Image: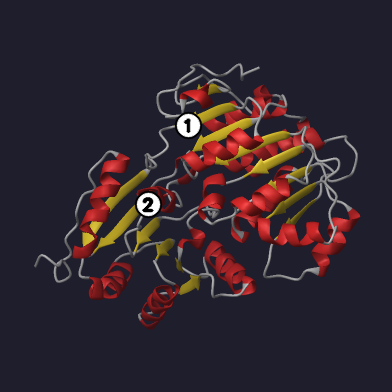
Amino acid sequence: MPSPYAVAICRRHLALPISFRGSMTILDSEATVGDVTFADLGLAQPLLDALRDAGYERPTPIQREAIPLALSGRDLIGLAQTGTGKTASFTLPMVHRLLGGPRRTRVLVLTPTRELCLQVEESVRKYSRHAPVDVIPVFGGVGYEPQERALRQGVDVVVATPGRLLDHLEKRNVDFTYLETLVLEEADRMLDMGFAPQLNRIVEQVPRYRQTLLFSATMPPEVEALARKYLRKPVVVQVGRRSSAATTVTHAVYPVPRHRKNDLLVHLLTAADHDSVLVFTRTKSGADRVVRDLSQAGVQAGAMHADKSQRERMQALEDFKSGKLRVLVATDIAQRGLDISGITHVINFDVPQQPEDYVHRIGRTGRAASTGDAYTFMSAEEIGLVRTIERTIGQEIPRVSVPGFDFGT
């Protein structure tokens, strides 16, 4: 049954094909539903204890709707902006359903990136600290044998990227005979990265009768097709409009010639105090140049992109989390999957090509009801991209002219 806390059934924001709507219950979780606690959602005491230890008191809107549905065994599609608590929406009911059951692989979570894989693993460990649940992250760029040993021994939860998991499946290192729940996290991103063939091969090797949970920030036709194929009469829970930007973020566009962007970034980050800054560049070489210029100006910065080894990427991320690095410069590898509290500023050094990417990028700040700032550096060649973003998010973004840097001066 749908969550008792659902207050409306709404189709208007989803834009689903008529043929697809008929097989779904669609819940819009934007309205206020009262003072709901995690205990009201039916979670077991060990999870409530873990939530208390983590300092969480009230569920977010998507958690409020998704958790009871997942606990009931329903297939589910969760649509929400980044930073709304999607990961806990499936890890909490997942851990709950593992309590007291047999010790074998019963849950598989597929993620598009290594960073998101580690985030989900961390979430499972956080919420299972008072429960006998074990989890292993499986991704490339790190040692193969430790993963092989753990998978052969059997673990409750496998969190994996598609490519490395297929390697283990082909070598028969993992047994999904008793799998109960399949989670597709950031499904739109997985399809954007070309993982559809790998997803098909993996799903062919898991039990047909299972619970499937699909979470995504957007619902393009490719994700709709994926849902039709893998889910049975799913309930769709949506929080906010799919293309809307986080309401806790203040936006600003800085007009600047392309060749002066590095100078403007150094100027902004040395002229005022910016506690924790995530900078997005379009290219890996661009990220390295930004780090070089910031470091020469005395700003602690590190780079995170695909040319870095997994160890280097993890170290940069850890240094950024701990505050050792004030600035993390990344390509779109970090656009999703980073759950770091306290990011005060996101800077789009290059305007994203797709407006949806703008929403995902700035979702790294202003998370969990905190506030944040999003700066976008716009060269004259990028004006059209910014206008497309403004149409997508339904608002104009103020221009901020910095004397000596604006290409109009």
Residue 162, which numbered label? none
- Near-viewer residue (194 or 155): 194
Question: Measured from the top left, where is residue 265 in percent x and y?
Answer: 30, 70
Q: Quadrant of residue 144?
A: bottom right
**What residue appears at the point 62 percent right and 27 percent down from the top-left corner?**
234
Taking the spot 50% from the left edge, 44% from the top edge, the residue there is: 83
| Amino acid on which the number 1 mark rests in the picture | Val
* Side (left or right) of 42 relative to 188: right
Residue 371, compared with residue 29, is above or below; it is below
Q: Residue at x 63, y 71 (%)?
A: 310
Position of 7 with respect to 353 (left or right) is: right
Local crowd size for mark 2, using a 10 Å CA cut-off: few (<14), some (14–19), many (≥20): many
**Circle 1 — which element?**
strand
For this rendering, which residue is in front, 163 or 393? 163
Residue where numbered disc 2 is placed: 358
Q: Is residue 161 visible?
A: no
Going by the picture, which residue comes out furthest to the left?
Answer: 409
- Residue 105 in view: yes
* Within-10-Å neighbours for mark 1: few <14, some 14–19, many 20+: many
Q: Residue at x 51, y 42 (%)?
A: 222
**Distance between the alpha carbons at the discs numbered 2 and 1:** 18 Å
Please state which amino acid type lies under the numbered disc 2. Answer: Tyr
Q: Point out residue 37 in the picture as x, y percentages from the top left corner.
A: 61, 26
Front-lying residue, 312 or 231: 231
Q: Secondary structure at mark 2?
A: helix
- Position of the C terminus, as image quadrant, is bottom left
Give residue 148's position: percent from left, percent from top. 83, 63
Residue annotated with mark 1: 239
Please report whichever mark, 2 or 1, sits nearer to the chain's N-terminal start.
1
